[in-house]
Image (cartoon, rainbow, N blue to C red):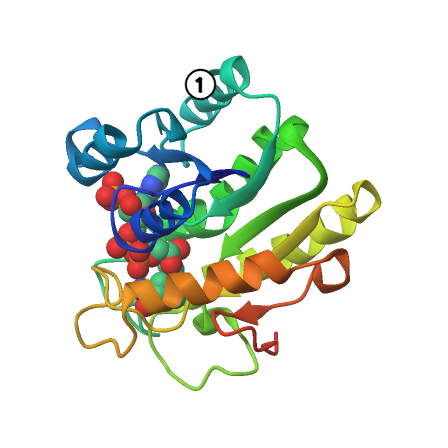
Amino acid sequence: MRILITGANRGLGLEFVRQYLNRGEEVIATFRKQNNILELEKLKNRFGYALTLIPMDISSSESRNKAFLAMKSKFSHLDILINNAGMVSNRELKFGDLAKDDIIEVFKVNSISAVLVAEQFNQLFKKNSKIINISSGMGSISMRENISNYSYCASKAALNMFTKLMSNALQERGIIVIPMHPGWVKTRMGTQSAPIEQKDSISGMIGVIDSLTLKESGKFFDWQGNELPW
Ligand SMILES: NC(=O)c1ccc[n+]([C@@H]2O[C@H](COP(=O)([O-])OP(=O)(O)OC[C@H]3O[C@@H](n4cnc5c(N)ncnc54)[C@H](OP(=O)(O)O)[C@@H]3O)[C@@H](O)[C@H]2O)c1
């Protein structure tokens, strides 16, 4: 299988790359900063042709387009796209302290760019290709009880809606599209207080992705395969 992963230089993206390579898949890892890819370069030395590294800042249309052209010149199709790249605002966004520019930036990366990446790579999907948008339980409106992180929670809720619309649009072509919650995982974003190890979250998600059929398209799952409420 051929799998493209965004934000693949660290955190969950990098662990997706490791685990897919270890089981013999062909991986395209995208990253936004050339000076930030030491771990990917080590994997490239070890796995050679099985790993292709392509720069892509998902929030830049020029960069998305360049990445697509680089992809298309080498590969005829994609089996899985994992829209993993994401961000939180450095500021804790609460009512009474909302910052428009921070909110726009978070929406741009977490919601809008993920969909635009999928759209950019659209012609490489075929029947049974899978688009996995890495969302968050924090994007579930019915599960929300906190009062902070406005931009992150709302951006993931918007990503869920975009994902549902995409799943409807791509159903006829037999393309499976879901949002997925990785759990609360130890990464720079998740912090070291998180209870879940990267390797467990990723092996769980890979198991869920393996088992997906068109019947599950448009549903919201966590890393253990539980269906989540919107
Ligand atoms: N960790 C958790 O507990 C948790 C829980 C729920 C959901 N998630 C979601 O899981 C995904 C991965 O998170 P993580 O925990 O691995 O976070 P992380 O360690 O902070 O990694 C985020 C990744 O996204 C990349 N990125 C950010 N903005 C980008 C852009 N404009 N273009 C391209 N790449 C960009 C980063 O690249 P740079 O290195 O260049 O910054 C980095 O590779 C995110 O979508 C996150 O929302 C995580």
Q: Is residue 25 left or right of residue 216?
A: left
Above or below residue 126? Residue 55 is: above
Residue at the spot x=75%, y=56% of the render?
214
Relative to 86, 181 lies left or right:
right
Q: Is residue 218 visible?
A: yes
> Looking at this view, is 188 or 108 the one in front?
188
Say which residue label 1 marks.
Answer: 66
Query: Image quadrant for the N terminus?
Result: top right
Q: Which residue is at the front of the view, 24 or 41?
A: 24
Closer to the camera, 122 or 45? 45
- Residue 103 shows up from this direction: no
Residue reaching furthest top? 73
Where's the C terminus, which quadrant? bottom right
Q: Residue at x 15, y 30 (%)?
A: 35
What residue is at 71 percent from the left and 64 percent from the top?
216
Q: Secondary structure at mark 1?
A: helix
Where 52 sits versus 228, above or below? above
Q: Residue at x 36, y 81 (%)?
A: 147
Horizontally, is 78 left or right of 48 in the view?
A: right
